Amino acid sequence: MELDDSAVNDLVALGLSRYEARVYLTLVRRESYTAAQVARAADVPRQRVYDVLDALVRRRLAIPRPGRVAAFSAVSPELALTRLMALQRESLERLDQISAVLAAALTPVWSAGQTHSDPLDYIEVLRDPKAIAERFANIQEQATHELLSFCKPPFVAPAANDEGIKAVRRLRRAGGTARAVYTHDALGDAEVLENVRRFGEAGEEARFTRELPLKLIIADASLVLCDMPDPVAATRATTALFIEHPALAGCLRLSFLSVWDQAEAASEARRP
């Protein structure tokens, strides 16, 4: 007779292995079985059935019957299920105790860890020009009320920077501010000047200065993207930092405004 798969699954849920469940369900079908008989009836490998029967006897779910050929009988299902539930409760109590001890040990460690901040949590280091350009576009998109830029060559974004122009228009429509400081070098570059003109038409305010310490963009006094040129002479390698840190962004904003106040309008600036 085929064993009921749902009954097997239920016994497995109560802590038996599948072989143990199959053997127990076979044993309940008649008074007793020899090991060979129950192996065939339960479809359990002969070499495994002795271990399975021993496990059921240890759990007090089966009873050995001495004789010329040893046989085994099942205890009543009511008693077997009561014993399985008792074992499950004991297991849950042990797990509860382990959980309590583990929680007591780990909670202070977790609490201490909450006071530790890793700078890398709010600083992203970028070295690939493509990744820098993507982050530059992203910070323009995130700005909601203010966008401040130090612009100097080489530029990682396309000279046209259509996305930047859209961001400036959006900011101005919302009553926000977009300001950029360019170096005097831009006055000798027709492509850059055209870009300055287009940004100006979109609503960006522009000024010029002789030199800038680095390329920088600040969004909403909270997000910063700046380049960190390699200080080794004769190299053009650069590293960009994307920083989400309002305090630092606020300090850099003050630096931008200081440079802005001293910079010149386009009509006053001279070409190099």
Image: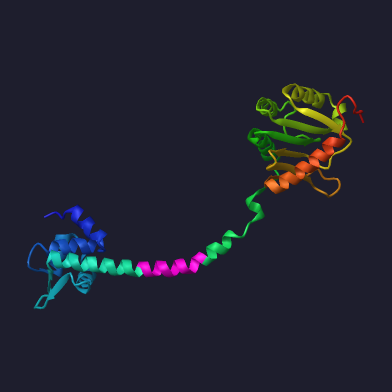
Give 156 or 119, whichever is nearer the viewer.
119
- Say which quarter of the image contains residue 70: bottom left
Above or below, 240 against 148 in this view is below
- Residue 111 rendering spot, x and y as whole percentages: 54, 62
Q: What residue lies at 57% left-to-right and 64% top-to-bottom?
A: 112
The magenta stretch spans which residues?
95-107
Give 56 or 247, whichever is nearer the viewer.
247
Q: Hey, which residue is sitting farthest left in the picture?
A: 31
Left or right of residue 128: residue 29: left
Q: What residue lies at 15% left-to-right and 69% top-to-bottom?
A: 35
> How was the colour assigned to the protein in this rendering?
rainbow
| Viewport quadrant of the C terminus | top right
- Residue 55 rendering spot, x and y as whole percentages: 23, 71
Above or below, 176 against 115 in this view is above
Q: Is residue 100 magenta?
A: yes
Q: Main secondary structure of the magenta part?
A: helix
Give 113 or 33, whichever is nearer the viewer.
113
Q: Hey, which residue is sitting farthest front in the picture?
A: 175
**Is residue 239 visible from the viewing direction of this image?**
no
Left or right of residue 200: residue 211: right
Q: What residue lies at 78% left-to-right and 42% top-to-bottom?
A: 254
- Say which quarter of the image contains residue 45: bottom left
Q: What residue lies at 70% left-to-right and 34% top-to-bottom?
A: 146
Above or below, 228 against 111 in this view is above
- Residue 270 rendering spot, x and y as whole percentages: 92, 28
**Is residue 88 visible from the viewing direction of this image?**
yes
The number of discs equals 0
Give 240 or 110, whichever is nearer the viewer.
110
| Viewport quadrant of the N terminus | bottom left
Left or right of residue 68: residue 219: right
Q: Is residue 203 magenta?
A: no
